[in-house]
Each structure stands twice: as structure tokens, then as C-alpha cells.
Image: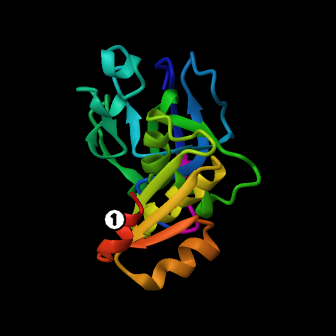
């Protein structure tokens, strides 16, 4: 583990197995600056990339030809990555985050995948400016997280769903400003 910028972490999230991981740093490379042994860190579905191509330089590592996923990939040392199914994982420090002490591991770990899936495009496309209108299609796992992020950014949120029964949840529990049923053509036209 003397490679610059690499860390090894071990993890167990309340017995839950998943692709996003939170664990304790057990080794650090000689040039690691982001964390130290004993720190709690999180890692989403990416654990490495070339860090030199145009995509990496523009923070869109998911398009890197050398991308290393935390699961179903082969890491630099030749070992297969197995996500949360393994007991430990090496990672480039660029792909880890220091974990807040007050955030429960099991509650926060899904933010490393589903949370990133909605947060990243919102930031990338400038949908984080107060007062901006945002439509969220579907109120499943990602839709829930998208509404929460959007409201944290002070956006005007309209949820579009297929089930009228989700209206109360969208508006009264999650704070959406409006709810449209996708097969109500008149309401959809009026919302334009």
C-alpha cells in the first residue's frame, strides 16, 4: 500500500451489503492527504480512474476509459472489485469522502449512490439556484432524494408521477410545491 494516493478501508454497515460503502481506513499510501488510518470514510460506486484524461480533468470520471468501479471491475493490482461483498477495498483518495461523525452509517451510505445520481446532474446543470423550477419524474428511491436535495437548494419542485396516491407524500411529507399525474393530460398541459 505504498502507492501514492491510495487508501485501504474495511467496512461493515450494520450487516447491509451494497455497492456504496462506509468504513475505517486501515492503510494509506505515502502521498495520501485526505485521510489517515482510523478515519471513517465513504465511497460510492467509483474507486479509481486515470485522473489525467480530459474527462477526469473535467470531473466526469464516469467517462474515463480507465474507470474502476467498486464492483464488477478489475482493480490496478489485478484483483476483482466486489463492492460491499468484500471486507475491504483499496481506492484512490479522490473517490472517498470523510464521513461526518453525526451521520449514521446505514442512513447515509445510500447518499453515495442514489444521492450522487441526483445531486451531480443538479449541480452540473446549474439546478441548485434558489427559485429555479425543477420537475422530478417519479417518486421512487431517486425521486425521494431528488426532492430533498431540490428543497435544500430552495427550488420550486413539481413531482410528476403515475399514481395520484403519491401526492400527499410528495407535497406534505417531502415538501414538493406541486404534483402532477402524468396521465392527466389537461393538468400536464396547464403546467407548461
Which residue lies at the image location 37% right of the left edge and 21% below the top edge?
56
**127 on left or right of 60:** right
Q: Is residue 12 magenta?
A: yes
**Could you say which is closer to the camera, residue 132 or residue 186?**
186
**Could you say which is closer to the camera, residue 68 or residue 3?**
68
Which residue lies at the image location 65% right of the left edge and 30% below the top edge?
35
Residue 12 seen by the camera? no
Q: Quadrant of residue 51?
A: top left
Residue 19 spot, x, y in % from top left: 41, 54
Give above or below for 186 relative to 120: below
**Could you say which is closer to the camera, residue 125 or residue 93?**
125
How many numbered callouts? 1
Residue 176 spot, x, y in % from top left: 57, 65
Q: Which residues are magenta?
A: 10-15
Q: Quadrant of residue 18?
A: bottom left
Residue 31 spot, x, y in % from top left: 57, 16
Disc 1: which residue: 189
Q: Main secondary structure of the magenta part?
A: loop
Q: Quadrant of residue 129?
A: top right
Amino acid at each position: 500500500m505504498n502507492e501514492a494516493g491510495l487508501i485501504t478501508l474495511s467496512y461493515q454497515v450494520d450487516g447491509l451489503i451494497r455497492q456504496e460503502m462506509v468504513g475505517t481506513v486501515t492503510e494509506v499510501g505515502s502521498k495520501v492527504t485526505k485521510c489517515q488510518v482510523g478515519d471513517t470514510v465513504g465511497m460510492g460506486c467509483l474507486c479509481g480512474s486515470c485522473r489525467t484524461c480530459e474527462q477526469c480533468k473535467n470531473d466526469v470520471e464516469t467517462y474515463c476509459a480507465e474507470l474502476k468501479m467498486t464492483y464488477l471491475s478489475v482493480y490496478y493490482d489485478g484483483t476483482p472489485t466486489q463492492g460491499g461483498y468484500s471486507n475491504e477495498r483499496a481506492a484512490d483518495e479522490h473517490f472517498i469522502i470523510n464521513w461526518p461523525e453525526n451521520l449514521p452509517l446505514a442512513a447515509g451510505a445510500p447518499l453515495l449512490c442514489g444521492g450522487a445520481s441526483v445531486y451531480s446532474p443538479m449541480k452540473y446543470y446549474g439546478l441548485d439556484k434558489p427559485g429555479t423550477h425543477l420537475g422530478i419524474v417519479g417518486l421512487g428511491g431517486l425521486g425521494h432524494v431528488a426532492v430533498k436535495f431540490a428543497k435544500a437548494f430552495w427550488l420550486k419542485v413539481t413531482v410528476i408521477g403515475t399514481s395520484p396516491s403519491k401526492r400527499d407524500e410528495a407535497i406534505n411529507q417531502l415538501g414538493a410545491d406541486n404534483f402532477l399525474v402524468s396521465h392527466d393530460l389537461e393538468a400536464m398541459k396547464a403546467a407548461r
